[in-house]
């Protein structure tokens, strides 16, 4: 019962944060409630998680990204070069990139405040470059949440013949597949 309720709350909260635009006073209680169900470092990525993953995979995506990187986009494992939110390894990344015409691992991408510039409209780009050019920078593709989440979504839902394919993250399954995930996250936060 607790697990299915938590599943529902995580999905509802990701949808809430992904679609929240101009918060109203009535949203304050929902923000507080959702902050008890989603790690704070993952809330920032609610929109790309919501926009990429099918609803039945959202809860697992939240858990896997927290277990793999604790929500840090710059997470890096020197042992096998796992990188970003979902800790994708270079060979897997490049395999997906080749199949889906995405930038290869270690490609430099121009971003504005962690968002690939190509995802912004030309009007927005021009406005931002005059107001805050300091927020533009080149980043390795695997550390950009948009791409890291997209590659992970493709692995889970598109490449394999079935959805909900979380095998690439089996090494951390004892964290994300456990009913103790919630307690572990709460103790660390």
Image: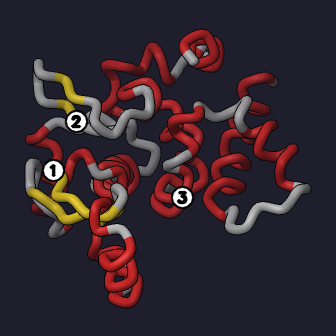
Residue at screen point 36% across, 58% down: 113
Above or below for 101 versus 180: below
Task: Tell whether 87 sits left or right of 51.
Answer: left
Q: Earlier in the sequence, mark 2 or mark 1?
A: 2
**Most distant residue in the right direction:** 26
Q: Tell me the distance, in whole angstroms, between the alpha carbons under discs 2 and 3.
A: 20 Å
**Most distant residue in the front direction:** 131
Q: State which quarter of the image contains the N terminus.
A: top right
Q: Observer-nearest residue: 108 or 69? A: 108
Q: Quickly name the residue at label 3.
A: 47
Q: CB atoms at circles 2 and 3 under 8 Å apart?
A: no
Residue at screen point 79% across, 38% down: 32
Task: Tell whether 167 sits left or right of 50.
Answer: left
Task: Tell whether 147 sits left or right of 182.
Answer: left
Q: State which quarter of the image contains the C terminus.
A: top right
Q: Earlier in the sequence, mark 2 or mark 3?
A: 3
Q: CB atoms at circles 2 and 1 under 8 Å apart?
A: yes
Q: Observer-nearest residue: 120 or 53? A: 120
Residue at screen point 37% across, 47% down: 156
Residue at screen point 33% across, 32% down: 167
Q: Quickly name the residue at label 2.
A: 83
Tell me where residue 77 appears, x and y as whole percent.
Answer: 19, 23
Q: Earlier in the sequence, mark 3 or mark 1?
A: 3
Q: Tell me the distance, in whole angstroms, between the alpha carbons under discs 2 and 1.
A: 10 Å
Tell me where residue 72 appears, x and y as whole percent.
Answer: 38, 34
* Kind of element beneath mark 2: strand
Above or below for 59 versus 149: above
Q: Quickly name the residue at label 1.
A: 140
Tell me where residue 102 appears, x and y as whole percent.
Answer: 18, 65
């Amino acid at each position: 019962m607790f697990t299915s309720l938590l599943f529902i709350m995580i999905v509802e909260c990701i949808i809430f944060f992904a679609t929240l635009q101009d918060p109203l006073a009535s949203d304050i209680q929902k923000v507080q409630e959702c902050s008890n169900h989603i790690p704070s470092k993952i809330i920032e990525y609610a929109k790309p998680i919501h926009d990429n993953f099918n609803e039945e995979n959202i809860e697992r995506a939240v858990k896997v990204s927290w277990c793999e990187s604790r929500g840090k986009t710059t997470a890096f494992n020197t042992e096998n070069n796992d990188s970003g939110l979902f800790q994708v390894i270079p060979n897997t990344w490049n395999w997906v990139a080749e199949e889906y015409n995405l930038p290869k691992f270690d490609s430099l991408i121009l971003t504005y405040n962690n968002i690939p510039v190509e995802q912004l409209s030309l009007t927005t780009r021009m406005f931002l470059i005059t107001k805050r050019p300091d927020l533009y920078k080149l980043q390795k593709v695997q550390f950009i949440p948009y791409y890291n989440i997209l590659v992970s979504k493709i692995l889970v839902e598109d490449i394999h013949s079935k959805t909900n394919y979380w095998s690439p993250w089996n090494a951390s399954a004892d964290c994300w597949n456990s009913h103790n995930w919630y307690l572990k996250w709460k103790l660390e936060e």
